[in-house]
Image: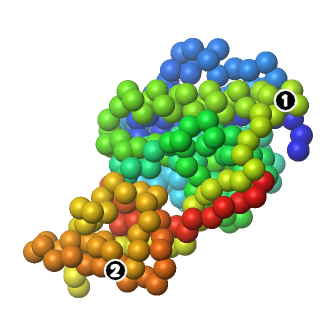
Amino acid sequence: MNQINRVAIVGGTHGNEFTGAYLIKKFEQIPALIQRPSFETLTLLGNPQAFTAGKRYIDKDLNRCFFIDNLLDSRLSSYEDIRAKAIEQILGQKSNSQVDLIIDLHSTTANMGLSLMLGSHHPFLLKLAAYLSSRNSQVRVCYTQPEKGSNFLRSLSELGFVIEVGPVAQGVLNAEWFQKTEELIHNILNYLEKYNQNLIPQTNETLTYYQYVGAIDYPRNEYGEIQAMIHPQLQFRDYQPLNPGDPIFLTLDGKAIAYEGTSTVYPVFINEAAYYEKGIAMCLTEKQVYSL
């Protein structure tokens, strides 16, 4: 792969996720923190109107507005659709990106630690992920929606990925996770600098990652109203094994509902506040080991 020349750090794609938004504010005030000799680092506040309003979005989820067809559709006129087109102009089209790598910063109410959310098995990203996870036990790697046909902001670059940190409440600036996220960003930028100097740090020979396989909604009645909550034994147990027969939900009248799958899975985004509207109580993954 060619040298990394331009990197974009995006925060505030969701306006009420303050960790990334305020890191962008900090980096804009002190740009020397993120500059490295061999490449340029850009910053971008993804959804400024939603950030000002302290809301996830104004009209619709900005991080679901990057389908190629939607970006080309001039009839789509919501604030987020217009903003997505503007971001594409800044970062470049999917087929002609103006940046070599995108780091999209997010926070979550789920116990995700420091999660790298990848959309491809690109060897460069896998080696970067292996390096970061070897340096910090809180770093986990999750493979989600493939970038081909993706509607995520990160898909504007072949080497785009999301960092999810948490648990952090919506609309709250948490100093601990702010510092941990900033440290992770510096580790990424330092790795890129070493890569450009042909001094790639040694990594583990294998990478453990979690492959997305599906999602589960809350039990609901015929009116769409939630009838059960995450079971206490599952709450905050992201990336931990969930076996068939384990309790997964607790009904409002105190009855446990067991997981009915046929194999062990590893839930993530358990009880994520922003996913209630999407009909997702948790996402399910399978644990994989990839040889580097």
The structure residue drawn at horizontal position 37% and vertical position 52%, both measured from the top left corner, is 110
Q: Is residue 158 visible?
A: no
Helix, strand or loop under label 2: loop
* Residue density around tag 1, few if under 14, some if 14–19, many if 20 or more, within 10 Å: few
Residue toward you, 103 or 61: 103
26 with respect to 193 (left or right): left
| Quadrant where the C terminus is found in the figure | bottom right
Residue 160 at x, y percent in the picture: 68, 47
- Which numbered circle lies on residue 245? 2
Give me the residue at 53% from left, 53% from top.
Answer: 63
Query: Residue 203, located in which quarter of the rendered image?
Result: top right
The residue at the point 24 percent across, 61 percent down is 232
Residue 199 tag number? 1
Question: In what quadrant of the picture does the N terminus appear?
Answer: top right
Other residues around mark 2 within 10 Å, as few (<14) / some (14–19) / many (≥20): few
Q: Nearer the viewer, mark 2 or mark 1?
A: 2
Three-letter code for the amino acid on which mark 1 is drawn: Leu
**Number of on-image labels:** 2
**248 on left or right of 84:** left
In this rendering, the answer to whether 42 lies above or below 16 is above
Residue 265 image point, x, y percent: 48, 71
CA gap between label 2 and label 1 equals 49 Å
Expressed as whole percent of the image width and height from the top left, the position of residue 193 reads 77, 27
Q: Which three-letter amino acid code belongs to the residue tagged 2?
A: Gly
Residue 219, numbered circle: none
